[in-house]
Amino acid sequence: MNELRAKSSSAHGQPGELLTSHLLHTLQALLRIRERIGSIPGMPSGFWTWAALACLLHDAGKLPEGFQRMIGNTRQSPTAWGERHEVLSLGFVGLLLPDLPDGQRRWIATAVAAHHRAFTCGLEVPRKLPVFHQYGTDLPEEFAARFTPADEDRLNGLVEWLHTTANQSGLPVIPVLPQAGLHELTGAAHQLLQELMDRWESPLSPDDPDGLTAVLLMGAVTMADHLSSAHSPLLTRHPLNSSYPARLTTRLVHQGHKLRPQQEKAATTRGHLLLRSWTGSGKTEAVLLWALTQTEDLARLNAANPRVFYLLPYLASINAMAERLGRELQAPEEIGVAHSKAASYHLARSLDDGCPDTTGHDNTPVNAAGAAAKAHSRAEATKNFRELVRVGTPYQLLRGALAGPVHSGILTDSANSVFVLDELHAYDTRRLGMILAMLRLWHDLGGRIAVMSATLPTALAELVTVTLDNQVQLVEAPADSPAPVRHRLHTRQAHLTDESSRDEIRDHLAEGRSVLVVANNVRDAITLYEDLRPFCVDLYGEDSAYLLHSRYRRMDRTATETGILRRFSTAGPRRPGLLVGTQALEVSLDLDLDVCHTSAADLEALIQRFGRVNRLGTLTPAPVIVHQPAYTTRHGSGAELRADGVYEAEPTQLGWSILSQHDGQTINERTITGWLDEIYRSPWGARWKTQVNQHQEEFRKAFLSFRMPFDDRSHLARSFDEQFNGTEAVLAEDHDAYKKALEAGPDKKTGRLHADQYLIPLPAWGTALSQYDKALHIRVIQADYDPRLGLLALHREKRQTYRAGEVL
């Protein structure tokens, strides 16, 4: 038994991990997970006992010689085995747990058999053969032949070890050690497999709670398995703890302030929260005080150590929030970053902490390989649920709805958690509906949810309230507490790119102001920047003018953002200059400029743009100047007209009508909330609400009903990714450098992380304009590109029509 291995070696010349060690580590990881998640509402009382037994037994089926040879643990050359070890592991469930009621034993068997593969096919034949299809028609003799030969002495030694370990852990196994041979083991496995097929081969009834139980149980076991394999300990000390309120109060006193009424009320709220308070009023601190109350409440009610998820729609704002929470909670290494580019975030941090100015002959930091390895390690730790406070996008948590061995752990980890959703208004109707459906599931699993905004529309607040079973408390600044007046509104009929608009921007620059210019599309932003930059540079120097949009190589975007923050950050002195960009500027950076010129968009987007001007309220009301957009069609969207080809026409026009009526007036966020309510009360608002509700119900039925919890969901995964993931590519001239970076790392994942600095985001339709390099697994584009201007034009293949000067 001491020669059985769980996996092949990760280091040359070293044996792989002992099977008994892996099983014990997985059981120990499960016990740590139980201490963290606690008692899950709606789950059967035996849930964690079943999960613990499944963890102890899940890989016991790695006993046969075929598996041991496959991982290089025999004297013979390694060769593929072709069988599923988790199926044979069912035999150990049968041998060691015959006295358990049939239903409980079936739950344990379910978790054991499901921890790698789907049971059934789904709507299409998957790449990996599902368990029931591989073994479902086997007779007992055929089934047994698949798993022999195997050493019976090792079998009995393993059974004895499992029996002893279960007893020591207080798990309910058969009192007397069973003596069994291979025939008994395979017979028990075959019998349990038939029982699982009877239970899970057909859809459950719509109201059967076993579907959700199955997914969460599978998630608990796969979480433990991943943690055991990664040897990644879970953090147990919560960075948001009882010391925070006193530290916050002390800081405010030193600044001449005290807790605001809405902060005090949020701190005493138990349950779901809607927080509406103006920019700069301490919403983040308020929601942290609320979150602390919820973590203490859930710890008491469910014996949990709740996770806190701070969810934002934009990657750049997520990175900034992670840094802020690290400072606020005095625990920078205990804040997880959970989004699709998390490793890139950690890489940038690692290089910044090291020697970023020391470069080698190829212009890359000499410590890049070590930084990339560190970054990958941090990202993997968050992926394996290490931190108790995590900042990310809702989409990473929505992936839990995909269930299966890969994603079910995300869903289990969300039970008894605390969720803060900032800027919920930023999502389109489909994504908002999906998020609302998930909010309801988090509510059912014991979660506490806060939605916060400076200008939370009543229509959105009502949707959240209904979704959360009307168990929501609204907290906002007192009516007699006036919102600060930071802006004076102006409207212009001239388009943002018209010469009269450019002249007005030049006048502001000549007056010594910092000017924010936000276009609705990349083409307009580049045009304006190229025209206005020379004027600004002549006045204030090379580092006074910047452009930012979404079509840069990652390395160039990082350098640009560093320069922007150096020039226009709220933390620095006011300096004149020019910042031109697109939606990428709305929430990405903590900036404070003197004046804003923007093309009209929907009112919620404009509010974000205004928020980058006079952010701290130190100026008299600063001008925010909104220009009439051009209504054109959008790439791939047919004949539908949109503001500058981007924003939906009708809400943009409704907002423009309201703004035009208040030209020249000062505005605040309380006023703007009233304008938003007016727009959402329109026929367009009624259609918006209907669409959100439809998408919410569609997502619930397709992803969250779990009527076939062990079906292959590859088709749903593709549907999900198509909605949320765009395309990335490398420039043809960067191809060789990208390849070199891939090969430079100590391993493939680290090399890819460093190579990712060459990637440029494209919209989903950009796939058709690229060529796929099968060897490097990356799309390659022929394009005009400038590190300062970003992506200028894609060159199509000769057989395609190309419009000169086309800008993405």
Image (cartoon, grey):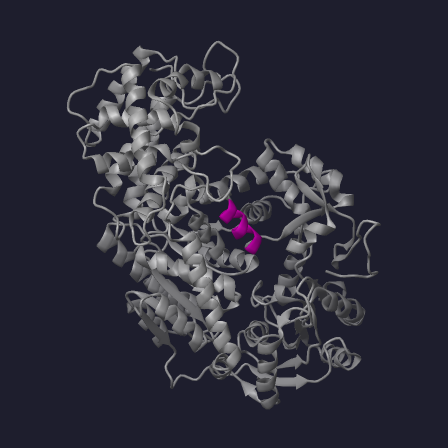
Q: Is residue 208 left or right of residue 282?
A: left
Q: Quadrant of the C terminus?
A: bottom right
Taking the image as drawn, is residue 792 in sight? yes
In this view, the residue farthest toward the top is: 75
Q: Position of residue 510 (x, y in %)?
A: 75, 78
Q: Quadrant of the N terminus?
A: top left
Q: Is residue 306 above or below residue 697?
A: above
Residue in the foreground of this view, choosing between 493 and 195? 195
Quadrant position of residue 310: bottom left
Q: Is residue 204 one of those drawn in magenta?
A: no
Quadrant position of residue 31: top left
Q: Residue at x 36, y 81 (%)?
A: 478
Taking the image as drawn, is residue 242 in sight? no
Q: Position of residue 313 (x, y in %)?
A: 52, 61
Q: Position of residue 780 (x, y in %)?
A: 73, 45
Q: Position of residue 140 (x, y in %)?
A: 33, 21
Q: Is residue 720 one of those drawn in magenta?
A: yes
**Across the whole image, how many numbered discs are drawn on residues?**
0
Q: Is residue 16 left or right of residue 562?
A: left
Residue in the foreground of this view, choosing between 104 and 773? 104
Quadrant position of residue 163: top left
Q: Is residue 33 left or right of residue 561?
A: left
Residue in the foreground of this view, choosing between 739 and 376? 739
Give, as a single range, the part of the protein colored magenta.
715-723
Residue in the foreground of this view, choosing between 677 and 516? 677
Q: Is residue 619 above or below residue 438?
A: below
Predominant secondary structure in magenta? helix
